[in-house]
Image (tube, helix red, strand yellow):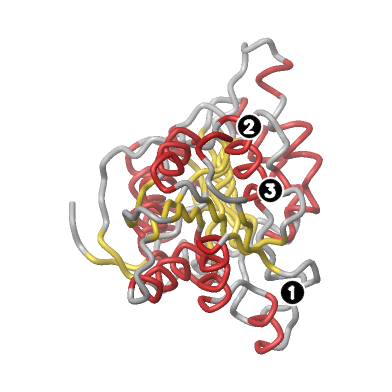
Amino acid sequence: MSDAITYREAVIRALGDELEADERVVLIGEDVGAAGGVFKATEGLHARFGGVRVRDTPIAEQAIVGTVLGAAVSGLRPVGEIMFADFAGVCYDQIVNQMAKYRFQSGGQTTVPATLRMAGGGSLGFGAQHSQCVENWFLQTPGLKLCLPATPADAYTLLRAAIRDDDPVIVFEHKALYGIRGELRDDGLPIGAAEVVREGGDVTVVATQLMRHRAMEAAEQLAAEGVSCEVIDPRTIAPLDTATILTSVGHTGRLVCVQEAPAAGSWGQAVIATVAVAGFELLDAQPALIAADPIPVAYARTLEEATLPSVERIAAGIRSAIDA
């Protein structure tokens, strides 16, 4: 399978293919039906599969997650959409204290094949309550798998893998990436496999979603200066493919993590801690984390962009790591 489609179209195709393949798959959320979703990421599915399997809900995130959990433990494979990832806070208890723990507290008697899709990320001027990357909110919760696709190919394969998984999976879709185009693949990508998207020998750069694309731009700029960056997209942060990252650091000796969320309690800090503990002898310099400023995301586009890691800030951070 190889044709260029948008990230948005990849999400729609993944949902459609799973709805077609398994009658237990259902999709629920705010405006996912006839409206096709606020970001048009479910467009056409209601007409194709009907209002029973593609069902609109009230504006009630607790109702969406509660319904998804109940459906999952009752034999369905539900997909719930949280329109803006920021509003996962409304149903946080249901996700981390119910959905994530249900299988363990039943002694493995009950699986929870539930998928939650959440649109997050900044750079579009949606303001402080609609622009956050919230994957780090869930990082410390055992029982959840966290996927962060950055390309149409990964949006397709990771979403299909999430729906087929017997454990709860959260797929974070980035709003600013819905329009990007790329080749689609159907290679059975497993959850927990990182990708080396650019090979290099001077520094390992680990970046997700929008920051993966900005890190690649920074790597291109630095290549002209004679700096060779190896760029890795973890694709999932729980589970995390530490082996791929450690292997890369083993031949570069340097590590820079780039994330859109603020630094505190983040996957970037976790990667640095893991490398420092498991591969301290591999490092030739202090690892670095390039992250958003620790303030709410501004509504004004110029202020928003000033707080997020830009290509220039990423390049400057990598230069500092090389010079260390």
**Residue underneath mark 1:** 297
Quarter of the image containing the C terminus?
A: bottom right
Element on which disc 1 rests: loop
Of tags 2 and 1, the one toward the viewer is 2
Q: Nearer the viewer, residue 314 or 22?
A: 314
User: How many callouts does the rendering have?
Assistant: 3
Q: Disc 2 vs disc 1: Cβ atoms closer than 8 Å?
A: no
How far apart, in angstroms, are the residues tagged by discs 3 and 1? 26 Å
Q: Is residue 217 left or right of residue 256?
A: left
Q: Earlier in the sequence, mark 3 or mark 2?
A: 3
Residue drawn at x 62%, y 44% as measured from the top left? 272
How far apart, in angstroms, are the residues tagged by discs 2 and 1? 33 Å
Of tags 3 and 2, the one toward the viewer is 2
Q: Residue 277's mark?
A: 2
Residue 186 placement (x, y as % from top left): 26, 45
Packing grade of label 3 (10 A; few <14, some 14-19, many >=20) is many
Element on which disc 2 rests: helix
Q: Nearer the viewer, residue 149 or 248?
A: 248
Residue 9 placement (x, y as % from top left): 36, 64
Q: Earlier in the sequence, mark 2 or mark 1?
A: 2
Q: Is residue 17 left or right of residue 81?
A: left
Relative height, residue 273 to residue 84 (above, below): above
Q: Nearer the viewer, residue 27 or 125?
A: 125
**Residue underneath mark 3:** 64
Element on which disc 3 rests: helix
